[in-house]
Structure formats: structure tokens, C-alpha cells
Image (cartoon, grey):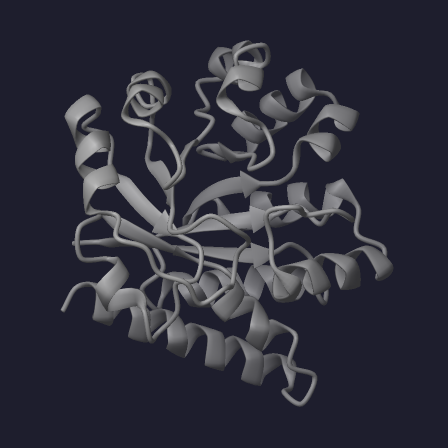
Amino acid sequence: MKKLVAYITSAYPDKEFTKDLILSLKEHGTDSVELGIPFSDPVADGPVIEEANLRALKKGFRFQDVLDITKDVSCSIDTLWMGYFNPFYKRGLQRVAKEAKELGVTGFIIPDMPYEESLGYRGHFDKEGLPLITFVAPTDSKERISLIVKDAKKFIYLVAYAGITGASKSEDLKEIIGNIREFSQTPIYLGFGVDEKSAKAKAKDVDGVIVGSAFVKILLDDSLTLSEKIDKISSLSGKIKELINS
């Protein structure tokens, strides 16, 4: 059974909504949730997730919101923290890793921290038994892949194309998937640009997909009530889970 990971911007429009949405996603095919930490310069994300980040910050997002959300959902669904390096560093990596472990977080996704830079900080996460998810890009050479995936844990995040999230691009990834599997047995999840139109094709040779912009786009639709947003996002989750396993 291929896995579905859902990215959700934390505490937008508020943390109680985020909790309700995540628990509904769990009932509609989502296997893991990435709790996105709002940040003012999300360099790997496209305009949809960037807008959600800015809206959350304008509404007064605090890191405590992530702690409160995690406390109430991690016992029900596999929960990861996704954020840029700056907010984690500002709070203190040792502190963040300890808090995450205590709250039941199962891993970190930090897209702007290259493998080489991460080596200086992994000790904080390793001490708590929390993996830093490994990223592989289509531009990575076979030699580089052999280096960065050798110690990969939980899953490998395969970026579907060079660029930002939410774009409608496609690349032939068979060779790079083959290279990853040559050096690691860790599951491969594909992210960037995955939606109901592309999910089935993109899931073909991997173990799961990561969906963000397709969900957040609904989150930003001000024509919908909060309950309608939850229903629509949850329905899309169920549809994508069915597509990737059909």
C-alpha cells in the first residue's frame, strides 16, 4: 500500500482548525502529516504555500501553536515537523528536538539545509532518535546519491523536479529512482507538484507521495466555510490515496 503524506500549514486559520483538519485527513487516507512551520521566506515553496505562511504569520502564529497541535494529533497520526532552518535554529535545535520527541514527532523535514550542512547538527536529532529526512533532487549525481542516502531513515524525499512546490512539471525519474534503490532500501516518497491529476503517474515507481499545494490551495479559498474546507481537503485526500493505489 503506497503512503500519502499531507503537508498542512500550522495554525491557519487557527490551531483548532488545524487539529480538526488533521484528524479528518487521518480518516480519509492520509498516513502521515507534515506540520508546516510558517516562515517569512519559504524558498522551496511556491506561491500557494508562501501565501499560507504569510497569512499565518499575520494572524500571530507562534511556535507554541505547533506544540499545542502536535500534542493533540500525534497520538492519532504519524506526525513530522516541516520547517526552514531559521525558526528551528532561533528556538534552539537541542530544545526543538527534545520537545518534538516528548510530543511524539517522528521526524523533521528541513528543505533549506543541505546534507553537508546537516552533518553539523544531526547530533541533536540523533540524540532523540529523530530522523532528518533526506532529500534527493533530479540534478543529483549517482555519486552524490550514494553519499546522501546511505544513512537515510523513515523515507527519502524525492523532489519531482528542480524548482519550487506546486508547479506543474514532470521529469523522467526512473534512472534516479534506480540509483537511490541501488544504495538504500529506505522507502522513497515523491513530492512537488503532486495533485489529483498527477498522483497516479507520479506514484508509479515510488513508495508514496507528498501532497502540499493541492491541499493548501483549498485552505486559502475564502469562499468556503471552515467545515467546507475540511470536507473538501479530506475528500481530495481520499481520492489521491485511491489513485496512487489503483
203 shown above or below 107:
below
**Closer-to-camera residue (141/59):** 141
Residue at 23 percent of width and 67 percent of height? 200
**Closer-to-camera residue (46/90):** 46
9 shown above or below 65:
below
Q: Position of residue 105 (x, y in %)?
A: 50, 35
Q: Position of residue 48 (x, y in %)?
A: 63, 66
Question: In screen coordinates, is 143 left or right of 72?
Answer: left
Question: In screen coordinates, is 91 left or right of 60?
Answer: left
Residue 81 appears in which quarter of the rendering?
top right
| Residue at the extreme bottom | 223
Residue at 48 percent of width and 69 percent of height? 214
Q: Position of residue 6 (x, y in %)?
A: 44, 57
34 shown above or below 140:
below
- Identify the image quadrant of the C terminus: bottom left
Q: How many marks?
A: 0
Residue at 62 percent of width and 50 percent of height? 69
Q: Position of residue 114 (x, y in %)?
A: 54, 26
Residue 58 appears in which quarter of the rendering?
bottom right
Question: In screen coordinates, is 66 left or right of 236?
Answer: right
Residue 153 appears in which quarter of the rendering?
top left
Residue at 39 percent of width and 63 percent of height? 194
**Closer-to-camera residue (16/237):** 237
Question: In screen coordinates, is 76 left or right of 82?
Answer: left
- Identify the image quadrant of the N terminus: bottom left
